[in-house]
Image: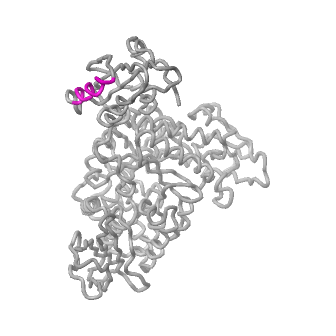
Amino acid sequence: MQKFANCRNGNYWNNTNNISKITQQTKPKPVSFTSFCKIDSGQFNKLIALSLRIFGNNASAMMFKITDNGKDGRMNACEYFLVRCNIKVPLLQNAHLLRKIAALGLAGTIGAIFLLTVWSTAWAAPRPVPGYISRLPEDEVTYFMLLDRFANGDTSNDRGQLSGSRLQTGFDPTSKGYYQGGDIRGLINRLDYVQGLGATALWLAPIFKNKPVQGPAGDESAAYHGYWITDFTTVDPHFGSEADFRELVNAAHARGMKVYIDIITNHTADVIYSQECVGQNDCPYRSLGDYPIRAYTPLVPPAEANIKKPAWLNNPVYYHNRGNSNWHGESGLYGDFSGLDDVATEDPLVVRGFIDIYKSWIDRFAIDGFRIDTVKHVNPEFWQVFVPAIRRHAQSKGIPNFQIFAEAYVDGVNPGGLAVFTHRDGLPSVLDFSFQSAIRNVLSRNQSIENFEFLYAGDVLYKGGANAALRVQTFTGNHDMGRLAMQIRKDNPNMAAAEVLERVKLANAIMMFARGAPVLYSGDEQGFTGDGGDQDARETLFGSRVAVYNDNLLLGSDRTTAVDNYDTNHPLYRQIAQMAQIRSAHPALRRGKQKLRAMGFSNRILAISRFEPTTNREYLLLFNTSAQTQNMNIEVEATSRSFQTLLGDCQTNVAAGHVVQVRLERFAYAICRANN
C-alpha cells in the first residue's frame, strides 16, 4: 500500500506550493475560502460537527490529512485516509470515515492538518441524486439514440470544424447517409422530453471522434452513427466538445438519469489498405491455415499515418490484416468488418490499451455503463480480462452497478445462443435479440405464443439463471434491423394503419412489463416506421430534409418527418410514459421473478405472473395477441384471493380452484395486482 511520507511533516500543508499541487488534483478551483487548523484528536470530531452545522449541503468537497509523529514504517491515520479516499472526499458521504479515523488509537503524538475548501461548482465527476446510484440494471428504462438524429442544439458544429463539400465535412442534411446536425447540446435541451417519456437511462451511439467520410468512390457515406472511430480519447466535433458531454452527464445525473455510451474494441475506421488488393473491389479473407504468418501487406496513406489515438493504434502490427470477413468461421473473428480495420484483440498490449481507454471515460465523466458493439467478432479471452477490469474500476470510482451489455446478434428465438456470451465470455448482460424475434414472430407473423414459452424457458441458461435474465436488454426494433412498425408492414402489406398501431402498442406493453430491462429506440414513441433497416431506420426527430424519410406514413399522427416530432401528446409517447410510471412504482415489474401461465399452440393470450421480491405478492400480466376477443381461464397462486387493476381491464374475482376467468378485447392488455 502506498505510503505518504510527507504527511508526517505538519509543515507540509503550510507550504503554498504544496497546497496548490494538492488542490489542483480535484480539478475545480477553490473560490470561497481555505481554512487551515492544527488540531489534536480530541478536537477533530468537534470540528467536523461544527463544519456540518455551518455549511451543510453547501460544502461539496473536503480534504483531510492527519499526521502522526510515530515511528517510521507504521501506517498512520493520514496514510490510511489518503489511500482509502484518494485525497478527494465528499463531505456528507464520508463523515463516518472521518469519525473512524479520528478515533484511531495510534501511538505517538497525533496532530492534524485540516483543509476545508468550498467549491462553487460540482466535481468533475458529478454527485448523484439520492437513490440513483443504487438502482440495479433491471430497474432502468433506457432510451437509445444516435446523437446526430435526435436534436440539433448548435448549428455551428454541423460540419465538425471541417470545411469543404460533404465528402470532406460529412454534412449533408438532404442525404440519409450523412450528418444531419444533431448534437449533445440538442440532447441537453431536450432532456425534459426524454425524462417525460419515463426513461431513466440514456444510451448514446458512439460519441468518439470518427473519420468523417469513407467508402469507395461514388458510394461514400459519413460516420454520423459513430462506428468509424479514429480517436478513442475525445468527442467527435460534429457532436460538440468534452465540456458539452460533461454537462450532459451532470444534467442527466441531476435528474436521476444514467448515461451509457456505446463502445467498440473490434475495429477502427478504415485506414489500413492491403497492397495486394489495390484496384480491386474486394479484398477476400485469407485464412490462418493458408497464410499463417502474413496474409496481406498493410499500407497506410501518409496523410493518415498518425490519425488514430491513442498512438499505438497507428501501428499495423496491432491489426489482423487478413481481408474482409465473409461472416463464416474464423473470418468472423479475424476479418475486417465491412472493410473496417480489425484490431488484434488477442494481443496483450491491445487488451491493456482498450482497458485504459475506457477507464479514462469513467474517470473523466462518471458514466454509468457501456453497450459493447460487435462482441461476437472479438475473441472471448479479451472479454474475460476487459469486463472484470472495467467493473472493478467503476466500483472503485463509486459506481457499484456499472452496466455492461453486449450486442451479440443471434437470429431467431435462440436464448442459448445469447447465454453463451455470459458464460464463455463473461459478459454481464446482452441485448435480447431472441425477445425481438419472439415479438416479431407473434405480433407480425401471427405465430403461436409458444415463441415466448421457448424464449422464457431459456432464462435459466444465462450465467446467474433467471435472475440474470431480469437485466437482459429487451427491445422491439433498432437502428440496424429497423423498427417493428416497418416489419409489421413488410410482413402484412395490406394491414390498416390502425391495426399496425394496435400491434405496436401491445409489443410495447410486453417489453415494459415482462422480464428484462426495456430499451426504447428514439422515434418509436413518435410513430416512426422507416422503409427498412440501417440508414432507412435512422430518421431525425427534428425537421428532416431527406425525401425518403419525409414520405413515410407515421403511426398515430398526421405529421411527417419534415417537421419536428417531440409531441408529448402522441398516443405512443403517452402509452410508454404511463407504463413506465407503473413499472417504476412496482418492484415486481422490475425485479420480480416470472412464471409463464398460459402455454400451448392454440392459446393467443400470453399470461405471465411476476412476484414482488419481498412479499411474494402476485402480479398477473395479460396480453391478447389475437385480432379477436379472447376468453381464457388462468390458474393463479392460492394466496391471490382477488385482483385489482393497475392497467387495462382486470377480472377482480378469483374462482374456485384458484382460477381467474379472463376476457380481453383484440390486442388488449391488462396488468393486475393480487390482494393476498
Q: Is residue 326 above or below residue 446?
A: above
Residue 199 visible to an observer of this rendering: yes
Q: Is residue 131 above or below residue 236?
A: below
Q: Quadrant of the C terminus?
A: bottom left
Residue 215 visible to an observer of this rendering: no
Toward which corner of the image does residue 300 lie, by quadrant? top right
Left or right? Give the position of 127 relative to 395. left
Residue 484's spot in the image, x, y percent? 40, 65
Q: Is residue 584 above or below residue 369?
A: below
Count of marks overlaid on the render = 0
Residue 281's spot in the image, x, y percent? 66, 51
Q: Would you say the magenta stretch is mainly helix, strand or loop?
A: helix
Q: Bounds of the magenta span?
A: 41-52
Left or right? Give the position of 274 relative to 307. right
Toward which corner of the image does residue 577 lie, by quadrant? bottom left
Left or right? Give the position of 599 relative to 572. right
Is residue 34 or residue 112 the one in the foreground? 112
Is residue 335 or residue 519 the one in the foreground? 519
Left or right? Give the position of 293 relative to 479. right
Residue 12's spot in the image, x, y percent? 42, 14
Is residue 296 or residue 563 the one in the foreground? 296
Instruction: Give me the residue at 22% from left, 78% from top.
Output: 642
Residue 617's spot in the image, x, y percent? 29, 70
Quick check: is 7 in the magenta stretch? no
